[in-house]
Image (tube, grey):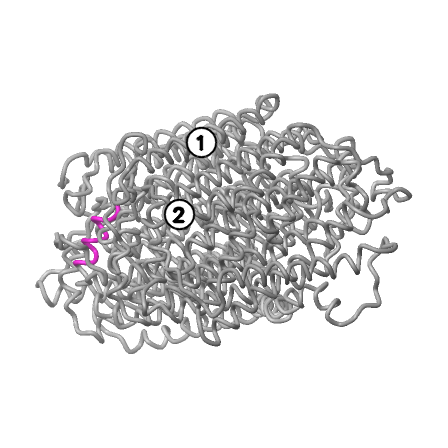
């Protein structure tokens, strides 16, 4: 085993702790309570490790840090090698943040017949280990393998623990991702054979492959680009490869939806940054207009579809599709502001949308499991705190300044504008849609007189809301009626508090994230021979 | 002309200017996080933080006047907010005469309205604390808007006040109309915000910065196209926030919020942010190349001031008439700042005097409604002067100030705008000046109608009951409500005379020297003309409404112009037909397509790819490739297994 740089034990621990956790929790699954506590303990430990890893990361240092490498298949030069750069680091930190919260949020959820909490949480921890591996892998073959294996726990998380149509959704999710991955495999092998031709010996080492591939002729680059691109575009997901996401989100348990949208999907945009830009710079530039069209189409299409959804969980999926459009826009607009914006967007979207999904989950739990928007209305009267946190999550989702998401959306747009003014202008109009769909959802669920089958059986939500003053009477009915709807409890407050803190904290002071990400972005731009359209006044960015 | 004079670093008293943001923000945070525990004293804390901010604002004002004229432009760097290579968005404050003036207006009127709200919200003790939290949040955001030293911090405050406005319009969130009005306000504001955002992007692309000092320093070197584009985009932002044509329709609906909110946010402060934005950007609008952008600003202002007046004549809702009056008066301000160096100071002057009298008029309306079971239909009021003497007197003073009664506030500020518009010269001057004059007459008309129907004539409410079945027992409001009204009334009387002399000189470091042009008519002639036209408007109103019985319900058989005005000159219908309905249809269509078409298409392609890779296998040779294809075969097996599990 060879290590590169200090603190490689940290990364090893980051990979092993959730893996170990999965094993232990599986062993303990007979006792729900112990299993839950063990899962929580492992996930918190992982989060602490992620923070320690961040503290020990030197943004101005080597591109890849805390790395180590083991030989796996010597005859093909395949290694098990991991390391982090600024982008991978922040993503691993976000995973570390979300998993304990997801476990906390799913603490009392009912599971389908015959499933145990232990099994559920063990799969989540396994998924965590695999995603950390995907972000940290520096061997392209290893990346591919993890990229595919990562689907398996998710397949079971959706297919075994999800809603009524879970099997359909799980298979659809699996097929889309898996077929995308296979196309990528062809490209990975293509890169390998180029290395064989060029170096005499094949390698899958990312840094070496970048050197080998990035000078290839444009036509070759384009073919290889597409292989990776389709896999990532399915994952991200870009329109029109997005249709698996609404089904998967709708059928997945709430916590799994958070992981799916918050983390798994980010592998796609992470791939754009780590693989497409450095390895195929010419193809990236050549095909940027295509990606930009898809990105902006995603913003508009996702937003419009979000406003038209009647199901809350499908709504969340379309909101994410719109947001992934912004991320892709930033990446393919090629400025350090837009790229940093996209990476920050990946982080902030996990926090904001993660929070939104969790809060919607809490709404659904109170409404007896109904995910229909029309089954709710005027809920803030019964649960003012829940209304407040839904609004906070919504405001972050619509990128209000002062929330974390504003920083990233602003960076994406202002950074994209110099190179892609038309696309950026269209995406900026998407801001209006964001306000529309968020406030629409908030109004339907929380405002107006109390109504809806989920809250007040027998009082349907009016399609065209009237202006009757009967709310007060209905509140009294609900309080004394068959259903007791209570506001946030301590567990739920504990789950949401860190997210609210981050929404506001990173909105006011995003510098720690920006300072971690920007050097990696600069290095990526150098690899792709990209130059900022707006140059800093005095200093020139140096390639490292 | 180099308006971007040297900017100094703030120190001493001004070095603590962050207190202005932190005080109200901390108040809001304590009240929101403290929950029910703060119910007892929440309103006091909320008011105290804003009063403290006002006291600091006064200190800051004297500190600024203590500097030499050259040294009155100061920046206070707080921290780097969004730094990425060439982009360096600083979180910093700009302390200069313009921002300090706004600080005094916001915290001064804000303090009065906080005090007023203690009484006004006493019917809602359970939620009063949250109301004060939102008011504090608004004050903090509004202060950030005027104090920020870059367009991005301005944008932060800009959307922040939008949020506070959303929360407060939707205060009665159990009512659908309030929730809908709040959403509408936020959305229409966002349309304007897109303009502001795009202006900021253009600045970064062409100038490389969003800080005021750099932008104003280099804006003159840009091409005319860029300058005009930025100017028009900033105006779009101003239209959203300030309820200017074509984004005016949200402001009357915003009256769904409690009346102190209408006074503070939707009359005195937030809705004037557009005027602030244009005055703040004066180094851009003053450029010769920005002439076209300025013309657009003037046109928007003129259209809006007329539109507001016309609709204001037709409404029967006390607060909505005042709302359209606000729309129209802001039209005057926008027209003024559109005049460029001849008008920035005048626009701000009118903004300040309007802040006094319109806040007072709204608080008076609130006082009337507070004593009349929240009745806002002026046809159901009448003869209240004797029941509410303090409200009547203070309201009448505000009314006189608004219609430009000689030597009250509006007389100084509005006349100056009319005069400056005429002095623009040529046909343009006659058109804009004429519209402004006509507006003065219409203003006097609708305001007099309001005065008569509410306070004079016979009490029409005696035999009526309010919507919740109670009969009316009008009474004067308590001292926490009347004292702010009295103070504002004093301001309505005196502010114009006091400020008109010194304000232009005071603002000079920020917006440049006031250029006094001389128009075709002398100042005296314009004054006399304005007073005569206003008197005419008021006289007609007296003839129409002052005599005889007024019906309790609005007459339905009316002429087309009245019907059009009652329907907001069809602004909402237009939005509905052009944007809302096509949007809904498009969305429904796309939802359908997404569920059927896209899914089917992609599934088809996937199936097709699966087939063709089968054919590819026979064409490919070589070790690595067959290895890959054997994995493909394996993966197909996996898929088959998964499918079997599914169907088993």
In this view, the residue farthest toward the left is: A200
Mark in the foreground, 1 or 2: 1
Q: CA distance from mark 1 to mark 2?
A: 44 Å
Give the percent coordinates (x, y) of residue B280: 38, 53
- What residue is shown with label 2? A263
Using residue B377 as the reference point, say whether residue A169 is left or right of it: left
Say whether marks 1 and 2 touch (CB < 8 Å): no
Q: Residue B267 location in percent, x, y?
A: 57, 48
Depth check, front residue: B54 or A99: B54
Please state which of residues A439 and B600 is positioned toward the viewer in this rendering.
A439
Residue B241 to residue A386: above or below = below
By secondary structure, the bulk of the magenta-drawn segment is best described as: helix
**Place of residue B383 in the rendered image (x, y in percent of width and height, measured from the top left):** 81, 44
Q: Is residue A168 visible?
A: no
Residue A339 image-quadrant placement = bottom left
Residue B188 image-quadrant placement: bottom right
Is disc 1 placed on a helix, strand or loop? helix
Query: Is residue A523 shown in magenta?
Result: yes
Asked if residue B215 is among those painted magenta in the image, a careful observer would answer no
Q: State whether discs 1 and 2 lie on one chain.
A: no
- Residue marked by disc 1: B53
Residue B161 or residue A230, whichever sits in front? B161
- Closer to the camera in the image, B408 or B260: B408
Span shown in magenta: A517-526
In this image, A441 relative to A96: left or right? right
10 Å crowding of disc 2: few (<14), some (14-19), many (20+): many
Q: In which image quadrant can residue B548 be found?
A: bottom right
């Amino acid at each position: 085993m060879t290590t590169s740089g200090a603190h490689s034990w940290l990364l090893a621990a980051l990979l092993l702790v959730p893996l170990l956790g999965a094993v232990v929790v599986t062993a303990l699954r007979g006792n729900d309570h112990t299993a839950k506590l063990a899962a929580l303990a492992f996930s918190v430990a992982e989060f602490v490790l992620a923070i320690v890893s961040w503290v020990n990361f030197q943004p101005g240092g080597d591109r890849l840090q805390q790395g180590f490498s083991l030989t796996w298949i010597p005859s093909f030069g395949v290694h098990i090698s991991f390391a982090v750069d600024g982008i991978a680091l922040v993503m691993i930190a976000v995973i570390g943040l979300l998993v304990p919260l997801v476990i906390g949020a799913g603490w009392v959820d009912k599971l389908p017949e015959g499933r145990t909490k232990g099994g559920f949480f063990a799969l989540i921890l396994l998924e965590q280990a695999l995603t950390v591996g995907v972000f940290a892998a520096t061997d392209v073959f290893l990346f591919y393998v993890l990229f595919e294996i990562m689907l398996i726990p998710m397949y079971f998380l959706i297919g075994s623990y999800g809603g009524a149509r879970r099997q359909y959704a799980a298979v659809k999710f699996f097929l889309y991702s898996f077929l995308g991955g296979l196309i990528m495999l062809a490209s990975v092998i293509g890169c390998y054979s180029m290395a064989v031709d060029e170096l005499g010996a094949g390698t899958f080492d990312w840094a070496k492959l970048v050197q080998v591939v990035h000078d290839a002729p444009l036509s070759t680059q384009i073919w290889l680009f597409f292989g990776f691109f389709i896999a990532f575009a399915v994952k991200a997901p870009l329109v029109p490869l997005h249709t698996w996401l609404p089904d998967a989100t709708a059928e997945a348990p709430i916590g799994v939806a958070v992981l799916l949208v918050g983390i798994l999907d980010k592998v796609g945009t992470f791939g754009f940054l780590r693989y497409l830009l450095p390895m195929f710079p010419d193809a990236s530039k050549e095909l940027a207009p295509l990606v930009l069209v898809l990105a902006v189409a995603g913003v508009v299409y996702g937003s419009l579809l979000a406003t038209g959804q009647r199901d809350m969980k499908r709504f969340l999926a379309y909101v994410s599709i719109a947001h992934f459009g912004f991320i892709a826009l930033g990446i393919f607009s090629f400025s350090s502001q837009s790229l940093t914006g996209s990476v920050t967007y990946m982080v902030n979207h996990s926090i904001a949308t993660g929070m939104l999904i969790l809060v919607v989950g809490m709404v659904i739990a109170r409404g007896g499991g109904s995910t229909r928007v029309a089954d709710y209305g005027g809920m803030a009267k019964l649960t003012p705190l829940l209304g407040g946190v839904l609004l906070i999550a919504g405001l972050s989702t619509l990128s209000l300044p002062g929330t974390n998401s504003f920083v990233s959306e602003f960076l994406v747009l202002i950074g994209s504008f110099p190179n892609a003014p038309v696309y950026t202008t269209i995406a900026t109009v998407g801001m209006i849609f964001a306000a529309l769909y968020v406030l629409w959802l908030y109004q339907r669920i929380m405002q107006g007189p109390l109504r809806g089958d989920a809250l007040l059986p027998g009082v349907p939500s009016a399609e065209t809301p009237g202006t009757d003053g009967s709310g007060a009477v209905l509140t009294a009915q609900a309080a004394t009626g068959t259903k007791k709807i209570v506001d946030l409890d301590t567990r739920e407050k504990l789950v949401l508090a860190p997210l609210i803190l981050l929404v506001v904290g990173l909105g006011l002071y995003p510098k720690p994230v920006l300072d971690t990400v920007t050097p990696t972005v600069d290095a990526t731009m150098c690899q792709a021979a990209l130059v900022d359209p707006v140059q800093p006044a005095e200093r020139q960015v140096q390639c490292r | 002309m180099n308006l971007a004079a040297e900017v100094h670093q703030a120190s001493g008293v001004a070095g603590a200017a962050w207190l202005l943001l932190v005080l109200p923000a901390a108040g809001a945070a304590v009240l929101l996080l403290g929950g029910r525990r703060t119910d007892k004293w929440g309103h006091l804390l909320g008011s105290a933080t804003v009063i403290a901010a006002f006291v600091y604002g006064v200190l800051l004002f004297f500190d600024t006047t203590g500097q030499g004229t050259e040294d009155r432009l100061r920046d206070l760097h707080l921290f780097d907010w969004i730094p990425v290579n060439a982009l360096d968005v600083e979180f910093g404050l700009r302390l200069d005469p313009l921002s300090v003036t706004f600080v005094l207006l916001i915290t001064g009127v804000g303090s009065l309205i906080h005090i007023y709200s203690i009484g006004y919200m006493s019917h809602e003790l359970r939620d009063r604390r949250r109301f004060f939290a939102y008011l504090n949040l608004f004050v903090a955001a509004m202060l950030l808007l005027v104090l920020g030293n870059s367009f991005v911090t301005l944008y932060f405050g800009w959307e922040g006040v939008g949020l506070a406005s959303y929360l407060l319009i939707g205060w009665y969130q159990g009512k659908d109309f309030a929730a809908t009005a709040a959403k509408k306000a936020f959305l229409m504001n966002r349309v304007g915000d897109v303009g502001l955002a795009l202006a900021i992007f253009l600045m970064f692309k062409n100038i490389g910065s969003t800080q005021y000092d750099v932008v104003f320093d280099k804006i003159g070197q840009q091409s005319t196209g860029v300058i005009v584009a930025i100017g028009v985009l900033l105006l779009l932002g101003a239209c959203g926030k300030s309820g200017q044509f074509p984004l005016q329709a949200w402001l009357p609906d915003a009256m769904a919020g409690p009346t102190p909110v209408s006074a503070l946010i939707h009359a005195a402060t937030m809705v004037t942010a557009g005027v602030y934005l244009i005055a703040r950007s004066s180094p851009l609008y003053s450029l010769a190349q920005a002439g076209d952008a300025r013309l657009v600003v003037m046109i928007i202002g003129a259209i809006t001031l007329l539109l507001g007046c016309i609709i204001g004549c037709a409404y029967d809702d006390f607060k909505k008439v005042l709302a359209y009056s606000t729309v129209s008066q802001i039209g005057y301000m926008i027209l003024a700042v559109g005049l460029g160096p001849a008008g920035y100071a005048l626009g701000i002057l009118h903004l300040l005097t309007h802040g006094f009298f319109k806040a007072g008029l709204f608080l008076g309306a609130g006082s009337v409604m507070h004593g009349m079971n929240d009745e806002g239909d002026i046809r159901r009021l009448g003869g209240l002067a004797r029941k509410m003497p303090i409200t009547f007197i203070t309201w009448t003073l505000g009314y006189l100030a608004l219609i430009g009664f000689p030597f009250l506030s509006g007389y100084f500020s509005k006349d100056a705008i009319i005069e400056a518009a005429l002095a623009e010269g040529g046909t343009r001057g006659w058109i804009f000046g004429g519209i402004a004059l006509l507006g003065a007459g219409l203003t006097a008309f609708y305001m007099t109608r309001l005065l008569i129907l509410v306070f004079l004539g016979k009490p029409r409410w005696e035999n009526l009951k309010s919507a919740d079945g109670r009969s009316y027992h009008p009474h004067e409001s308590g001292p926490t409500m009347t004292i702010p009204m009295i103070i504002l009334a004093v301001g309505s009387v005196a502010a114009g005379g006091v400020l008109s002399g010194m304000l232009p000189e005071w603002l000079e470091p920020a917006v440049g020297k006031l250029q006094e042009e001389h128009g075709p008519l002398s100042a005296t002639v314009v004054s006399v003309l304005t007073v005569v036209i206003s008197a005419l408007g008021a006289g007609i109103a007296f003839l129409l409404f002052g005599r005889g019985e007024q019906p309790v319900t609005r007459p339905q058989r009316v002429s087309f112009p009245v019907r059009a005005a009652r329907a907001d000159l069809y602004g909402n219908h237009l939005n509905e037909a052009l944007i809302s309905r096509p949007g809904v249809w498009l969305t429904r269509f796309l939802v359908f397509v997404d569920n059927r078409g896209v899914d089917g298409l992609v599934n088809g392609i996937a199936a097709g790819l699966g087939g063709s890779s089968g054919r590819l296998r026979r064409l490919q040779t070589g070790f690595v490739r067959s290895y890959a294809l054997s994995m493909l075969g394996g993966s197909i097996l996996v898929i088959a297994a998964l499918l079997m599990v599914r169907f088993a």
